[in-house]
Amino acid sequence: MARWTEQAGFRGALVYTDNTLVDAWAAAQLALDHTERFVPLVAVNPVDSHPFAVAKTISTLAFLYGRRVDLNLVTGGFSKHLSELGCELGHRERYDRLAEYGEIIRQLTAAPTAVTYTGKYYSLDAAVVSPPADPALAPDLYVSGASDDCREVARLLGVDRLSYPHQIDSYQGDRPLAGCGVRFGVIARDDAEEAWRIAHERFPSSESGERLHEWAVGKVESHWHLKLSRDALRSHAPKGVYWLYPFRAYQTFCPYLVGTYAEVGAMLQRYMALGVSTLILDEVVEPEDLHHTTTALDHAYAQAG
């Protein structure tokens, strides 16, 4: 998939982390091994990795490959995963810790100098990563979430926030998504009927998936997950090109845009007009999916002028 992403002209891809997945850093290194320009966006969580260890891994990969790795700072959204690792912090405290976490990583990777830091959750005394940090390859940081606590951390760190978009007409005010990245799946074709045929083929009706989603909602602490679940439980019928059923049936974790290139492009442009700065795509089935998405994005950029 990393090669597909690079060949289609995208910057990189999100590398997930939680207790049930392969190690995110091993996956990121494998992607670097098989690409030339691909930038992994690695999810990191204070619950299972110290900020010094993260900074050291970044400096090591920069030394070995001469490549950048970006970071998605997360707090963990599943209560079971948090309790498995002994984390009893509340939602606000986890984001307070994440703010310290991100600041330490930024300082350690910004320059090959000693970092001293004293906070509530972390303290460093003249810590220096080795190999020395390369400022030219310092990571871009993102914070993941939709809560007010997440918004505050993004403000404190001066970084963009990644979240999951609601239906376009639910937003109010001037550029309410300014400084936001959003995650979508995209199925776009010349013909809308063909796009929807593929969409229903990939995400068929699933009563068991719907029941699993209803059960899982009670186990989730993530605000974006809960908000999007409320939308999906209320109505998962398509609203124009916006489609929540794949999420409702627990077949994926984001909304989909389905339709013609022009229709999907027009919707993407509307989200961009609300301030969206970064697009994270759902996992693709085949490399052509990325090229279809690129065509829809071309329509969006053309409409934006």
Image (spheres, rainbow, N blue to C red):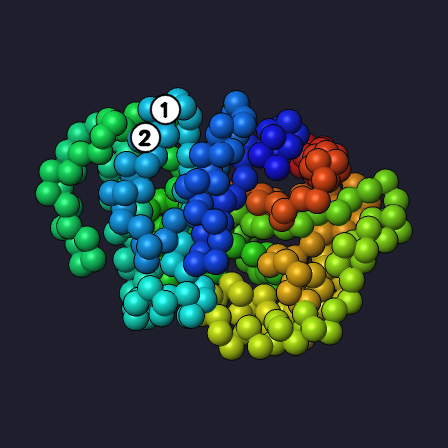
Residue 64, numbered label? 1
How far from the left and from the top, in percent, is residue 90?
Answer: 32, 70
| Picture quadrant where residue 189 is located | top right
Question: Which residue type carries mark 1?
Answer: Leu
| x 24%, y 38%: residue | 107
In the image: residue 290, left or right of residue 40 = right
Please say whether residue 273 is visible from this viewpoint: no
Q: Please give the name of the residue rendered at 57% of the width and 45% of the height, measured from the top-left corner.
A: 280
Q: Where 194 sits versus 34, above or below?
A: below
Q: Amino acid at mark 2?
A: Thr
Position of residue 255 measured from the top left corner of the image (x, y, whole percent): 65, 57
Circle 2 residues within 10 Å: few <14, some 14–19, many ≥20: some
Task: Please state if 69 lies on the left or on the right of 195 as rendered.
Answer: left
Q: Is residue 193 above or below residue 136?
A: below
At 22% from the left and 33% from the top, the residue drawn is 129
Q: Is residue 173 left or right of residue 66?
A: right
Image spot of residue 191 (x, y percent) = 88, 44
| Quadrant in which residue 140 is drawn | top left
Q: Are marks 2 and 1 in contact (CB under 8 Å)?
A: yes
Q: Quadrant of the C terminus?
A: top right
Q: Residues within 10 Å of mark 1 (few under 14, many from 20)?
A: few
Q: Is residue 267 above or below residue 219?
A: above
51 vs 288, left or right, is left
Q: Residue at x 53, y 65 (%)?
A: 225
Label 2: which residue? Answer: 60
Q: Secondary structure at mark 2?
A: helix
